[in-house]
């Protein structure tokens, strides 16, 4: 949902997609998946400073 804080787990090879995890505030369900790394969809920050998806580690999980 809009304005939900999420945990970013990493990126794909070209940085166009990022792997995320969050708790759905409506259901309390933990959700994990991929989201398109476009500025109008997601803003990625580290300690409050915006970063590019290419600066994220490569996701190697399941």
Image (cartoon, helix red, strand yellow):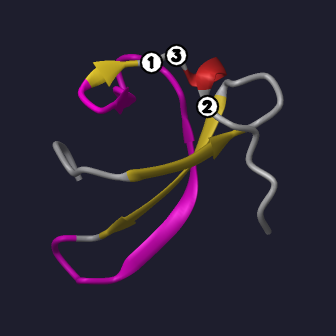
Residue drawn at (61%, 31%) of the image? 56
Mark 3 and mark 1 residues within 8 Å of each other at the beta carbon: yes
Label 1 environment density (alpha carbons within 10 Å; few <14, some 14–19, many ≥20): few
Residue holding disc 3: 52
Whether 35 is among the magenta residues is yes
Residue 59 position within the rendered picture, expressed as x and y whole percent measured from the top left: 74, 48
SS of the residue under disc 1: loop
Alpha carbons under labels 2 and 1: distance apart: 8 Å
- Say the numbered circle drawn on residue 1: none
Q: Residues within 10 Å of mark 3 (few under 14, many from 20)?
A: few
The numbered disc on residue 56 is 2
Q: Is 13 rendered above or below residue 24?
A: above
Q: Which residue is mark 1?
A: 51
Q: Which range of residues does the magenta coloring cover?
A: 25-48
Left or right, 33 with reference to 30: right
- CA separation in Å, label 3 and label 1: 4 Å
Looking at the image, which residue is at 17% across and 71% down? Answer: 25
List the single residue furthest toward the front: 47
């Amino acid at each position: 949902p809009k304005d939900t804080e999420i945990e970013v787990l990493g990126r794909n090879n070209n940085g166009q997609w990022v792997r995320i995890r969050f708790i759905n505030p409506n259901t309390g369900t933990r959700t994990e998946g991929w989201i398109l790394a476009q500025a109008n969809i997601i803003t990625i920050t580290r300690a409050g400073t915006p970063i590019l998806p290419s600066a994220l580690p490569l996701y190697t999980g399941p």
